[in-house]
Image: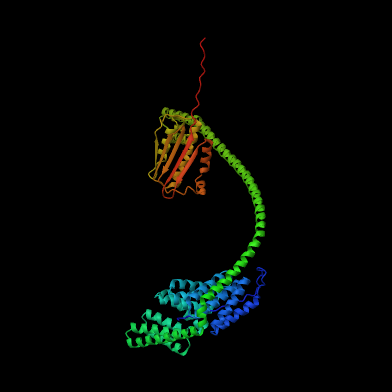
Amino acid sequence: MLLKHILILLLFVSNSSSFSILAQTKLPSKNDAISIAKEANELLKKGNYEKSLIKSRVALNMAIRLKDNNLIAGSYNTIAANFDQLSETDKAFYYYNKGLIYANKTNNDVLKNWLNNNLGNIYCFDKKQYEKGIFYYKKSLQYSTKIKDSAQIVFTKLNLTWAYFDINRYEEGLPYLKYINKHHKRYGDISTIVALNMLNGMYYNYKNDVKAADFYFKTAIKLGNAGNEKSDLSYSHYEFSKFLLKNGDYENAYKNLALFNKITDELNNEEKINKANVAGINLQIDEYKREIDKIENEFKTKESALLQEQSKNKKIVIVLIAILLLLFFLFYFYSQNAQLRHKNKLKDLRSKVQENLINASINGQELERKKIASFLHDNISALLSSAGMHLHACISQNQSTSKEIIKTKAILEEAHDQVRDLSHELMPSLLARFGLFDALDDLCEKNSSSILHFEYSSSLNRKTRYDEDFEIKIYFIIMELLNNTIKHSEAGQAKLSIQENNESLQITIIDNGKGFDSTKFHILEGFGLNQIKARLNYLRGTVEINSKPNLGTSITINVPITYQKKIIKPVFQSQ
């Protein structure tokens, strides 16, 4: 069989196992179990499969009772290797898998490495299930790399190369072949040199390099004839015959194919002789499997009875611990909830204080705006207008007017215009004289440009008036939002809509700008919406912001309307 090198491993653990009493039966000595396992392994190497299997069964029985997963896995590996040598592939496959189950419960990466490699051999060379075989080879390679076993790395990569080449996936096998060519001299085994030369021949045949392929195939056959690797030699003849046939050398192709058949027949005859020498085992293989399973089942039954006895006490302890833990967690969660409620109260208080401070600041600013705007309009602007009128009268009376007077007149007019503009900026005259809707229409028109156009839309009567303080706050909220649109949106169109709905004012601002992720709090903070929210909270209003990147932004505000206070005129009864 091609590269069918069976890897045998017995694991020796220095740490002593913990002892347990099973149904008043004395446990075997661990040293005795290890000694018997060693003996079984030596018998396997000598080809004495019958005695090796008998010793392995005894070692397995002792290992199961000791609950030593390393010894159990090692015993299964030895049993599987015996069946492998007897060409009982199904039995070998069964016990390799059993061994891997127990090996995976240990930290023994060496044992895991060899069991995975042996399973890869069976999948690739016996079952011809190459994908599964490659999977197990790669698992083996992971463990050999982890334990830094260079010889095993070379060996497993040789198997991987062969598996890929067998299914014509040469480029996937090439990296492994390059590694083996580089490191085989130092870390490889002499038993694989024939296979290595054959694999190089297969690759160069694939690359149509006739000279190199011919050299490697002939080297493989020469080394095979000089050594003991008859299986690898037979396959070298087979691959060489395929190469010769491909290149038209039919005579030599036939000769090599005949040699392949001859060596294969010899190997099959040797296999038959081995089976004949252990004929008694072949008749008892199924019984052997049943007996091993019986050993495991008996042990598990005894162990289960003991565990049930022990579990009663454990359950009582667990229930008590669970009750204590439950009480502890209930107290802990109660304490945490109390602290959380306290923190939330403090947080709400801080939030309300901060909001009140913001509103007080905003109200103060608006009051100052009104005072300054009123002072500028009623006093400064009036004084400048009066000075301008007197200066104009002076100019009219004097035919010759100096340049200084004309310049003074121009400066007075400019100062008057700037004072008027500042007064309107602080408190728009349209807002005071004509109301909120005319002021907002004017605001949209003033903010419109060739880059960004603001559209104003409202079905409400322009003459509708609300409380003066309410109108001022709404005006400055909208002004701030329009400023945000100009600064951040990169929009070309924006629309301001105002409607009344159930005694609430509904304000909507939509733009077609770049938008943003409105779910991210820090972005909203960056747009200065804290003050806007504080103003709306003061008015008992709400704001909803919907925006996504590249999809524009929509802001909807709902505010309960505060109407103008009616002035009740006193009615006097006539005398």
Residue positioned 58% across, 79% down in the render: 55
Please tell me whether residue 449 is drawn above or below residue 19 in the rendered image.
Answer: above
Please tell me whether residue 53 is drawn above or below residue 228 in the rendered image.
Answer: above
Residue 188 seen in the current view: no
Q: Nearer the viewer, residue 471 or 266?
A: 266
Residue positioned 45% across, 82% down in the render: 195
Question: Farthest residue toward the top?
Answer: 575
Please tell me whether residue 133 is drawn above or below residue 236 in the rendered image.
Answer: above
> Is 123 on the left or on the right of 255, as rendered?
right
Q: Nearer the viewer, residue 345 or 559?
A: 345
> Is 160 on the left or on the right of 69, as rendered?
left
> Is 300 on the left or on the right of 181, as rendered?
right
Question: Farthest residue toward the bottom?
Answer: 226
Residue 77 seen in the current view: yes
Q: Position of residue 112 (x, y in %)?
A: 54, 73
Q: Position of residue 575 (x, y in %)?
A: 52, 9
Which quadrant of the figure contains the N terminus? bottom left
Please tell me whether residue 318 is drawn above or below residue 473 in the rendered image.
Answer: below
Q: Nearer the viewer, residue 366 or 285?
A: 285
Residue positioned 32% across, 85% down in the render: 248
Q: Position of residue 47 (x, y in %)?
A: 53, 84
Q: Position of residue 30 (x, y in %)?
A: 65, 75
